[in-house]
Amino acid sequence: MIELEYTALSELRGPLAVVSGVTGVGWDESATIRLSSGETRHGLVLEVDRDLALVQVLEGTSGMSRNGTRVTFAGSPLRVPVGPGWLGRVCDGRGAPLDGGPPVFGTSTAPASGFPLNPAWRVPPAEPVLTGVSVIDLLTTLVRGQKIALFSAAGLPHLELAAQIAAQSHAGGEPFSIVFAPPSTSAAAGSADGPDRSPCFPC
């Protein structure tokens, strides 16, 4: 497959870049963005209109210039390797390790955005997950496969609560995993920069 590099950036605004002159680019396609400094960033196509592609730059557009920036589209959505190697690991939204460990490899890959799910195919949740936190267990009992969002203001012990849930949770002796996925956190936990949000996904 021949990779085409596009150098015509018509606009940079916030985390978005508008690439002009594109052909054959589709929605949700992943992109590699190379700056004139040699830095590499990553993006996702949010919208395509004729020869214009609206790309969300995952690392932001700070320091980017309309001149000297090259964009390559992958021809498919962002995919990450899947498998048991992820257990106990910490990664970013692209599957790159954040814990200082080696890259995670798998025998197969899956779209980072997940597959669409037909609600009619879901098995009704019936297996409770006991967290050891009485207010959660009594008022908002969790079941396997359910999500719980922990919304907190800066300075409150939401990280300690999340760690307590991870350490104490059990499902009647059945093995299960807990995945923590913070969609947005401040630079330093507990800082005054704004609210920290740390959803916890028992599964």
Image (cartoon, rainbow, N blue to C red):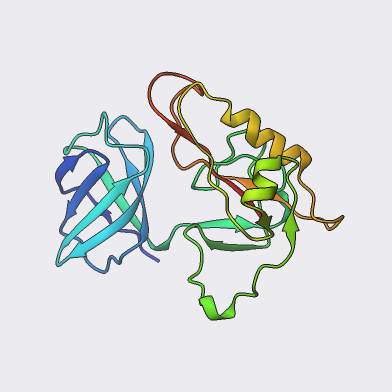
Question: Residue reaching furthest right?
Answer: 173
In terms of depth relative to the viewer, which is nearer, 125 or 83?
A: 125
Tell me which residue sits at (79%, 49%) in the image: 170
Q: Is residue 100 visible?
A: no
Residue 52 is left or right of residue 34, and the answer is left
**Along the viewing direction, whichever of 95 and 195 lies nearer the viewer:** 195
Residue 16 position in % (x across, y down): 24, 45
Residue in the image at 37% along x and 43% along y = 58
Instruction: Tell me: 12 left or right of 100.
Output: left
Residue 23 x %, y %? 22, 66
**Residue 10 in the image: x percent, y percent?**
12, 47
Q: Residue at x 23, y 38 (%)?
A: 14
Vertical position of residue 171 compared to residue 68: above or below: below
Q: Nearer the viewer, residue 101 or 116?
A: 116
Quadrant containing the N terminus in the rendered view: bottom left
Q: Quadrant of residue 181?
A: top right
Quarter in which the C terminus is drawn? bottom right
Q: Specify whether 158 is left or right of 47.
A: right
Please say whether residue 27 is visible from this viewpoint. Answer: yes
